[in-house]
Amino acid sequence: MAKGGFPGGMGNMGNMMKQAQKMQKEMMKLQEEIEQRTVEASAGGGAVTVVITGKKEIKSIEIKPEAVDPDDVEMLQDLIMAAVNEAIRQADDMAAREMSKLTGGLNLPGGLF
């Protein structure tokens, strides 16, 4: 009668566990590095520029004086919103690129990082 289990026996399972633990440590280290990096995005031809971290914390917002029109506050609000949203998108893209380098393109479920 054939025994069930993993091909190669328990030694192979132990190696897989070690590899998984190593990858987990590398992913945690990379996540910390990503959180320290920054991305910059602008809107309105550079009228509003936003810098955020990979952790999606705003580091700075620069607004050029010519973007400030007391009669059109809504336009300035839209520019700020557009710049922040673009910066968040860039931070997400940067994190995904860096993580895919580590995982080698594995299709890991979202939310693990």
Image (spheres, grey):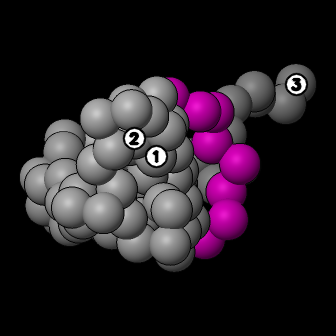
Q: Which residue is mark 2?
A: 76
**Span colored in magenta:** 104-113
Q: Nearer the viewer, residue 25 or 96?
A: 96
Q: Amino acid at mark 1?
A: Leu
Q: Are marks 2 and 1 in contact (CB under 8 Å)?
A: yes
Q: Amino acid at mark 2?
A: Leu
Percent x, y for residue 73?
38, 31
Residue, x 28% and y 48% (percent of image)?
Answer: 68
Q: Is residue 84 above or below residue 71?
A: below
Mark closer to the observer (2, 1) = 2
Question: What kind of secondary structure does the magenta stretch mostly adopt?
Answer: loop
Q: Which mark is residue 69?
A: none
Marked residue nearer the N-terminal end (3 or 1): 3
Residue 54 locus on image (x, y percent): 28, 54
Real-space Cα separation, disc 2 to disc 3, in angstroms: 75 Å
Instruction: Give the quarter of the figure containing the C terminus.
Output: top left
As drawn, is 75 to the left or to the right of 65?
right
111 in magenta: yes
Residue at (37, 65) in percent of width and height? 47
Left or right of 111, for residue 107:
right
Residue ID for mark 3? 1
Q: Residues within 10 Å of mark 2 (few under 14, many from 20)?
A: some
Residue under numbered circle 1: 79
Label 1, residues with CA under 10 Å away: few <14, some 14-19, many ≥20: many
Q: Is residue 51 visible?
A: no
**Residue 111 vertical placement versus 92 (above, below):** above
Secondary structure under badge 1?
helix
12 inside magenta stretch? no
Q: Earlier in the sequence, mark 2 or mark 3?
A: 3
Label 2 to label 1: alpha-carbon separation: 5 Å
